[in-house]
Amino acid sequence: MEPMVPLDGRFMARRLGFLDVVSNSGNQIWFFWGPDVRCQVLVDHEQLLHVRVESNKWPKPLFVTAVYAKCDTVERRELWDALRAASVGASLWIVGGDFNTILSPDERSGAQPRVVAHLELSQSDHRGLLVEAECTVERKVSSFRFQHMWTTHSEFLGVVRRNWQYPTVGSGMMRLQQKLTRLKHCLKEWNKTVFGNVFDNVAAAERGLKEADEAYDQDPCDRTLVERNRCSAELKRRFRGTIFGIQHEGEYLTDPIAIKDSAASFFQRLLTAEPVFPEEMDGEHLADGLTDEDRRSLCVMQTLEEVREAVFSIDPDSVAGPDGFGAVFFILVGRSLPRMFSAQ
C-alpha cells in the first residue's frame, strides 16, 4: 500500500521472490503472486484493486480486494459503490487494506468478531498479515456396511454377544431391528478403536516394511530377515482389508470424485429408464397344479429351523442388504448365538 515509488513490475517481483505483480490505476496498490496461483484483474479502481485468484490446490477460486481509501468522506462514497459492484455473493472473498475510517478496531460497527495475527516488522514499516487457505473436504455421515475383516478379530464375537444381550422392548422383528440398530453404533465405535483408519494403517505398514528392508540390507541376519517377513505379511494383510477403487465398464476408477460420479450415473440410468411391462398372460392356459395341501402350506408360519436353513444357504459373499449387514454376519453370528433365530 502506498509505495510512493514508480512500479517496475519485473524488477520488484524478482527482487521479492514473486512471479509477477499488478497495480491499480493510481499506483498506490501493488498485488504480487507466486508461481502456484493464477491472477486476473477484474476491477481497477483508484481506491481498490479487485482480482480473481485461482490455484490447482483449491477447489474454488478466491477473490481478493485490496483497498486504499481516500481520506475525504465524500470521496470514499465512490469506494463503497465500487465494493458493492464487486461483490461476489457466496464465493470466497478477502477484503483488506487501508480504509482511513477508524483509528482502532474498537471504533468499528457491525460484522462478527475475528482474530488477527500481525507478522513482525521486516523491511517495511507495515505489519503484514498472513492468510492461509486450506482445502477442507466435507465429511458426510457414512452409511453402515458390515466389514468381513471384523470377523477375523478375536474380540468380534464377544463384542456382538455382549451388545446382543442388552434388553429391548417389543417382540419379534421389532426387537431384531432394535438390536441391529444398536449393534451398528457399537461396531462403528469398535472399528475406530481396534482397526482405526485403514489408509493410515497401510501407510504405517509400508513405512515398517521399508525400515525392515533397510535394516536387513545393513545387517542380513536371521533376526532382521524375520522382521522383514513379518512386516511384509502385515502390509499384505492391510492391503486385503482396503478398497482402493472400483471397476466401471471395464475401467478401474480410483479417484473419489470419479467413483461418486460413476455411482450417481448408474442409479440415474437405473431409476429413469422406461419401464417394460410384460404382455398380458392368458390364465386359461395355465394348469392348476396346486393340491389342497399345497394351498394350506402357503399360509403356514415357517419354523425357526426353516429360517435358519434359509439364512445359512445364502452365499456369504453376497451383497449386504439395506441395513448394511451381509449374509456372512447372520451366518457367523447365528451359529455362535443360537438365540438370534428365536421368537424372543
Image: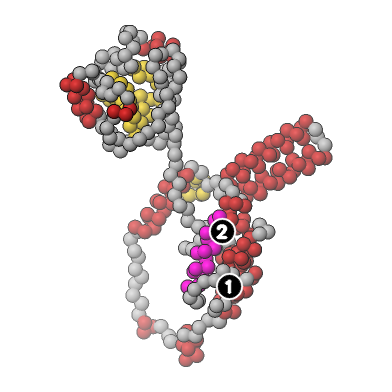
Instruction: For marks 2 and 1, give the CA distance.
Output: 17 Å
Question: Identity of the amino acid at label 2?
Answer: Leu
Q: Residue at x 29, y 13 (%)?
A: 27
Where's residue 183, x and y in %?
A: 54, 63
Q: Residue at x 33, y 36 (%)?
A: 112
Quadrant housing residue 231: top right
Query: In this picture, which residue range is highlighted in magenta?
Result: 174-189
> Compared with residue 218, is residue 276 higher up or lower down, i.e. above or below?
below
Residue closest to the eye, 23 or 130: 130
Q: How many marks?
A: 2
Residue tagged by mark 1? 340
* Label located before the other in sequence (2 or 1): 2
Residue closest to the eye, 187 or 254: 187
Q: Residues within 10 Å of mark 1 (few under 14, many from 20)?
A: some
The answer to whether residue 16 is left or right of residue 187 is left
Given the current orientation, which residue lies at the most extreme right position? 222
Where's residue 236, x and y in %?
A: 66, 46
Q: Residue at x 33, y 27 (%)?
A: 105
Quadrant housing residue 285: bottom left
Circle 1 — which element? Answer: helix
Q: Is residue 149 visible?
A: yes
Residue 187: give its label: 2
Is residue 218 one of those drawn in magenta? no
